[in-house]
Image (cartoon, grey):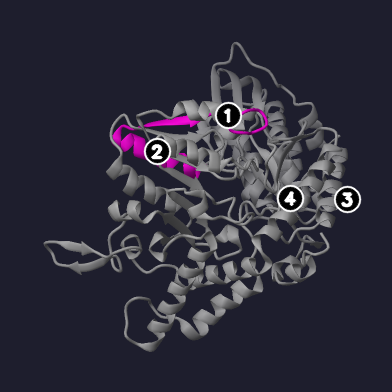
Amino acid sequence: MSIFPIEQIRADFPILGETIRNKPLVYLDNAASCQKPQAVIDSIVYTYSHEYANIHRGVHTLSVRATDKFEGAREKVRAFINAASTKEIIFVRGATEAINLVAQSYGKSQLQACDEIVISAMEHHANIVPWQMLCQQIGAVLKVAPMNQQGELLFDEFEQLMNAKTKLVAITQMSNALGTINPVEKIIAAAHAKGIPVLLDGAQAIPHMAVDVQALDCDFYVFSGHKLYGPSGTGVLYGKQALLEAMPPYQGGGDMIRQVTFEKTEYAGLPHKFEAGTPAIAEIIGLGAAIDYVTTIGMDKIAAYEAELLDYATQQAEQIKRLNIIGQAAHKGGILSFTLDRIHPHDIGTMLDSLGIAIRAGHHCAMPVMDFYGVPATARASFAMYNTRQEIDVLMQGIKSLIEVFG
Amino acid sequence: MFEDLRDLYQEVIFDHNRNPRNFRVMDNANRQVEGFNPLCGDRLTLFLKIDDHVIIDASFQGSGCAISTASVSLMTEIVKGKTEAEADALFKQFHEMTTGKSEEINLEAVGKLAVLAGVREYPARVKCATLAWHTLDAALKNEAQSISTE
């Protein structure tokens, strides 16, 4: 781990210096949202101080500057996920909005009654509910590929679910509740062999691994900026250009039109067709700064460092009696979801909070996953590139102490 | 190690969490209401036997955190033998104690329920303590088969 500049990275995140209940903050709720480096905070302050105006509108200098920066962020996103063109990068509020966009625009225009959509048993509600809504609207059918007790997708069952009626596969690249990393290359190849397009929910995966949408050959890829150390209210929909071209707009308004009369509206081309109204300008420019930040460190280095953290945390957790790890896939990202016998996750959450440790306790917006394991909730520690072994030691000591207190 | 939490997790709460009182299905209940907190997944079923406006028996089933388990356990103990009107008054006192603005706790009115007063310093946990009482409220009004805190 010595080559990973952990001290420098920690110094770049001002919030990591906070004390919570008089203890140094140990922030392990990164799967919910990541903290922001100074570069992102500075970017937002700089935009509002020097470069802010509405975009794509005015001829005045500030508007031109803001537009250049905003479109510059689009190019940064394109390069980050290696999309073929900035026309394929649509800015939205988050992964949730991106999936809703695909469901309502692609789904409603391309799917019909009795068509099928395949998801998996480990999806976040954001990759379940938009499809249920679509199914109710058009009479399509949602199919759920099962997983095993370790939290791994049962690939053969998944493959068998795909048939002539299947029109879309929507699956997470990394489970937010379990940490499972799905074999997305295999999934995409199997779906494409049957002519079925694939949407990848990259909300959890994007801060933890390098993503190349052309190498993956996914048809849609969605992620949220706030989980990539960027501002909240930012998200990205990547779609292959031909698919996006064929899709009707999701919302109507300003910025998404070429010409409007009361009789007829001609829509703008990509990507603006899907970006009605004023977007989160400063925040999206800030997302560009976040991408610069992680790119400078290197996604492969981040992935390697976090893999070591997870290994260490898992080894330590396995030493604790009464602790059950929920989600033990062979291929996992930095998430340790667990329960303690006879101690409810919310009590774990409150007890750890009193020690300055922030974890998530609850259903993680994945109630079907909780049902699968027969638990109402789990406690979840989720790691980011700025976490350390020492913080994991603090967590484990806290867990041991609260077990003693509860008796 | 958990000094800050002594007001929230008093020994009585640990005791009721480990050994919940009246934790059983009641076959001859004439009121039965489900309480659900969708935020944390806590679920309980409250059973009441009410005769001539008096709560003859109270019991519960379900799973939840220590605060919610202790709260419903204590509640089933304290409402037994009370009239519906008295139980309703207690609900209002409990609600005031856990969510109210006043610093003073009416110890005479709430009795041993005072061990749950600590939740008001923890906004994220107030609903854990009040779920039982909202479920009781619905059962007394006899108006719902299930209630939700959201």
Taking the magenta stretch, the answer to whether it contains residue A151 is yes
Position in image of residue B88 (x %, y %): 58, 34
Can see residue B29? yes
- Judging from the image, mark 1 belongs to the subunit labelled A
Q: Nearer the viewer, residue A181 or B93?
A: A181
Indicate which label's residue lies in the foreground, 2 or 1.
2
Specify which label sits upstream in the sequence, 2 or 1.
1
Helix, strand, or loop for circle 4?
helix
Tell me the amino acid under the disc marked 4. Answer: Ala
Q: Which residue is mark 2?
A: A196
Between the C-alphas of marks 2 and 1, the distance is: 19 Å
Residues under labels 3 and 4: Cα distance? 30 Å
In 3D space, how far apart are the residues under numbered discs 4 and 1 (Cα atoms)? 23 Å
Relative to residue A296, is residue B69 depicted above or below? above
Q: CA distance from mark 2 to mark 4?
A: 32 Å
**How far is mark 1 from mark 3, CA to CA?**
44 Å
Instruction: Judge depth for marks 2 and 3 and give the one in front.
Output: 2
Q: Residue at x 43, y 73 (%)?
A: A71
Whether the residues at callouts 4 and 1 have beta carbons within 8 Å, the answer is no
Rendered image: mark on residue A154: 1
Q: Position of residue B144 (x, y in %)?
A: 47, 28
| The N terminus of chain A: image quadrant | bottom right
Residues rendered magenta in the picture: A125-153
Residue occupying image coordinates x 23% and y 68%: A258
Instruction: Specify whether disc 3 shares its chain with disc 4.
Output: no
Q: In which quadrant of the rendered image does the C terminus of chain A lie? A: top right
The residue wearing badge 3 is B1
Q: Using a 10 Å C-alpha cutoff, classify the residue at mark 2 as few (fewer than 14 neighbours), some (14 to 19) or many (20 or more).
A: many
Tag 1: amino acid: Leu
